[in-house]
Structure formats: C-alpha cells, structure tokens
Amino acid sequence: MQRLKHGHELRPPLFILAPARSYTSIVCAMLGQHPQMYGLPETHLLCHETVGTRAARVARSAHLSMEHGLLRAVAELYFGEQTESTVRRARQWLKVRADFPTEVLFRTLADRAFPRLLVEKIPSTVNSIRCLRRIQRKFPGARFIHLLRHPRGHGESVMKAIAERESRTGPLPPTNWLMRIASYRPHGANADSQDGAEVLDPQHWWYARNATIREFLGSVSRTRQLQVRGEDLLADPDTHLQAIASWMGLRTDPQAIDMMKHPEHSPYAFIGPRGARFGNDRIFLQAPALRSGPAKPQDLDQPLSWRDDGQGFLPEVKAMAREFGYS
C-alpha cells in the first residue's frame, strides 16, 4: 500500500456537488487557485471500490474521456507535467495500483498536493445518493458546496452543448451523456413527444439531480455545507470567493482572492496531450478565463426556449428553483 508522507496532516477535501453544465469546471478551477487549495480535474474515482473497478467501468463506457482527468492529475502530480509520455507513465502507474481502494488513491493525490487541500467536482457523483454517502463515509470531515444554476440557464447550456457537438460530429446517439441529460425522465414518467419525436427537455435532469444533492446534504452537518448560486459568484467574484474562503477557514486576503479570479492558471485549464485531452468541460478548456459581470436575467414563468410547443417549467421545478432563491 502507498505510504503517505503527510497522511496525518492531510486536510479534509472539498467536493463541489452540481449537475453537469452548472459552472463546475470554472468554479473548481477558481477555487483551486487559492494558495491553500488544489483543484483537480474530474477523476471519477470515488464512486468505485478500487482503481481496477473504475478502470473496468471506463472501458465498458462509451465515454472513454472519463479517464482523462485522473490520467492528467497523476501525470502532473507524480511526473511533473502533462505530455504524451507522462500520460503513458500515468496509465501504467494506475494499472500497477489496480487493487488500491479509490479513497486510498485519492489520499495519495492529496499527499502530493500537500499542504494544499484537494477540491474536486465530479457531476457524475450526484447521479447516485449511494455514491455521495460513500464519499461521506470515507471522508467524514469533507466539506460540500452545492453549486446552483438557474434551470433555464442550465437547460440552455445543455442544448447549446448538444448543438455545438452535433455541428462537429453529426447527430449524437442516445447513449451520449448530453443526450441522456436532455432526454432524462423520472422512473415511471410518460415519454414526452412532439410530432412523434421525443422532446429533449433538461429540466427533468436538473430537478432530479438537485433533489438528490438536497436529500444527501440533509444528513451532513450544516457547518460542512454551503449553497452557492453560480451566477452570483461569477457576477461578484470578490464577495463570494471571500465568503467561501472564510467558510473554509482559509486565507481571505486580497492576494488570495485575486489568485482565485484566474482559473486559466490551473494546470488543467487547457486541452491536454494525446490520450488525455479533457477532464474538464471542452468549452471551458478552450476559453478558461473568468468573465465576470451581471448575470443574464432568467425567468421561471416564460416558455422554454428549447421547446416548440410553448411549454414552461414544471411546478416542482419552479418550486425548487424558488427555494434556491431564483425567480
């Protein structure tokens, strides 16, 4: 088993919980630029028992890019840079450690990043409350940020990403993760169709994933959870970044806050080398700089721009969004 040089000194990690397309890439990169925090790319580690079971899951998946974030993190933290060569070494390094429990590997990454504490966002974790509870058991001192996005902005972001991807590759298959988000319906719900075709409507995913997060956080001490609206953070980063750092018990001086306003300085804020190109949202990787300013007005009562039938948000979506402070 890997020996940890700083094992007894490692600070509990911070996990960002949010559905995909909820500002997770830029917020994780921003927080990771704080001099006492280290923002990881998406490792997809902690929902699996061992490194080997994670690798097997990735191999069976249609989304091989799920392995990119962990490869990039190992290449950077253990081999000092991200190149085709170090990515190959990282792949072998992980293969040798296939029997490692994933929480042990996560701690080895924290050991390499010491004295900075790890910040991780993995939108796939919020698909399963069992996964979230497993993380809580393995890291009982962990803190959690519930990162929010208005359901209209979230839905428009999902549909924009689908359009951007289809402009490059053609129609996406139903198994694509973006299509799964847009076509998701709760178990037992009737299919939503229009002119004989299934309607893509991301509001169902937004509601289901935020409901899972809310249920999980009901079992977490209130002192270890924080709710943050992404639009507010990006519109006024100084205020909200200082509040997050204060809640974490970390430095809140102007230099530390200014460092967090430069997500482009993250070692993972660019398209990676062959074999590990992603690990974060593609659009963020292509233009990772913070662009702060007033948020675009969003309305819960207007028809949805991604539907042609004039339908709006479901009552339960409106109620949850208003609970989060949206109008």
Image (tube, grey):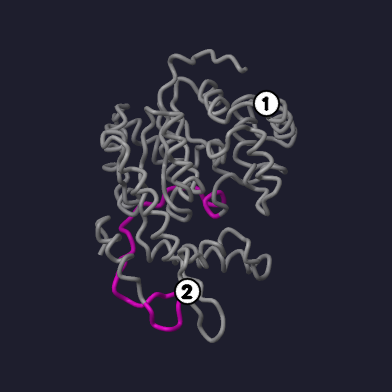
Name the residue at 53% across, 40% down. 47
Bounds of the magenta segment: 283-311
Image coordinates of residue 285 in percent, x first then y, are 56, 49
Label 2 environment density (alpha carbons within 10 Å; few <14, some 14–19, many ≥20)? few
Q: Which structural element holds mark 1? A: loop
Q: CA distance from mark 1 to mark 2?
A: 45 Å
Label 1 environment density (alpha carbons within 10 Å; few <14, some 14–19, many ≥20)? some
**Camera-nearest residue between 239 and 154:** 154
Question: As drawn, which residue projects farthest toward the bottom?
Answer: 195
Q: Considering the image in quadrants, where does the C terminus appear?
A: bottom left
Q: Would you name the residue on which mark 1 appears?
A: 97
- The quarter holding residue 50 reads top right
- The quarter holding residue 325 reads bottom left
Q: Would you name the residue on which mark 2 appears?
A: 190
Q: Earlier in the sequence, mark 1 or mark 2?
A: 1
**Camera-nearest residue between 191 and 167:** 191
The kind of residue tagged 1 is: Arg
For residue 107, above or below residue 72: above
Q: Is residue 91 magenta?
A: no
